[in-house]
Image: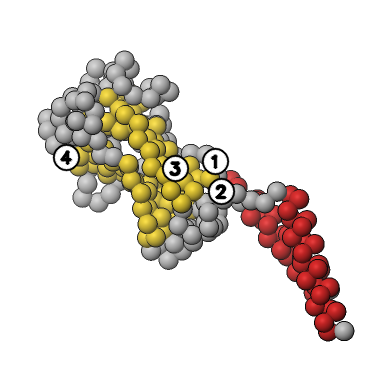
Amino acid sequence: MKIKNLIASTLLGLVAGLSQAAVYDQNLIFNGGAEQGTSGWNGFDDYDFVQSVSYGNNWVKPSEPGPLDRGAKMFPGLGARAVAWQSLDLEQLSGAGDSFKLSGWLGGWQAQGDNAKLFVSFLDLSGQMLGSTEIGPLSPADRGNKTGLFYREASGLLPTQTATLQFWLTMERLGGGDNDGYADNLSFVLTAAPVPEPATYGLMALGLVAVGVSVRRRKA
């Protein structure tokens, strides 16, 4: 009876792990394209906020470098230094082997040094930071002194025991009157660690049965 319970609990655990797939293979940054204004983003004390503006002559023209699926809106900053953030609690603690990709389009105005940066912090259940990853900033040289947005990405393994993701978007003004740190199509996607094929679960169960039979024989 104990062996049967062990097999059942093991298989249930495997199935439960598969059922927590809602956070995988989708963009976990809400409103990463500014199409919903600044909805989903929070301000930070003592810093200015970001804004959502339409592509056009005052910012980045639709004909200038940027994502093909850029939509109508993009993020620039306000003031000398702008900060916006959002947080997401995962449905379960991350396990070993889960991977991530942080990506986005970042840019600025001509030869000005204004820039944008996106980074993610990985927190455990107690709120302690386990690690972080960032993309940006781009210098004028990185942009070829062109106005526009350019793709950047970073990837890696998600720290085990990650319970919360915090996304931070910052824009810095280094010249001119506007904060021309630009961002659009911000994305963070989790990919689950490879899981055994269904047939493998059966083999695992058979293995547990074999262990149980061996134990019983030794007792006999």
Query: Looking at the image, is mark 4 or mark 2 earlier in the sequence?
Result: 4
Tell me where residue 214 appears, x and y as whole percent. Answer: 81, 75
**Element under label 3?**
strand
Marks 4 and 2 sit apart, C-alpha to C-alpha, by: 39 Å
Query: Looking at the image, is mark 2 or mark 1 earlier in the sequence?
Result: 1
Q: Closer to the camera, 125 or 192?
A: 192
Q: Residue at x 16, y 34 (%)?
A: 113
Verify CB contact (< 8 Å) between mark 2 and mark 1. Answer: yes
List the residue tagged with mark 4.
80
Verify CB contact (< 8 Å) between mark 4 and mark 2. Answer: no
**Element under label 2?**
loop
Closer to the eye: label 4 or 1: 1
Mark 3 packing: few (<14 Cα in 10 Å), some, or many (20+)?
some
Q: Establish if 190 lies above or below 70.
A: below
Tell me where residue 134 appears, x and y as whole percent. Answer: 33, 45
Closer to the eye: label 2 or 1: 2
List the residue tagged with mark 1.
25
Mark 1 packing: few (<14 Cα in 10 Å), some, or many (20+)?
few
Q: Residue at x 53, y 58 (%)?
A: 96
Mark 2: amino acid: Ala
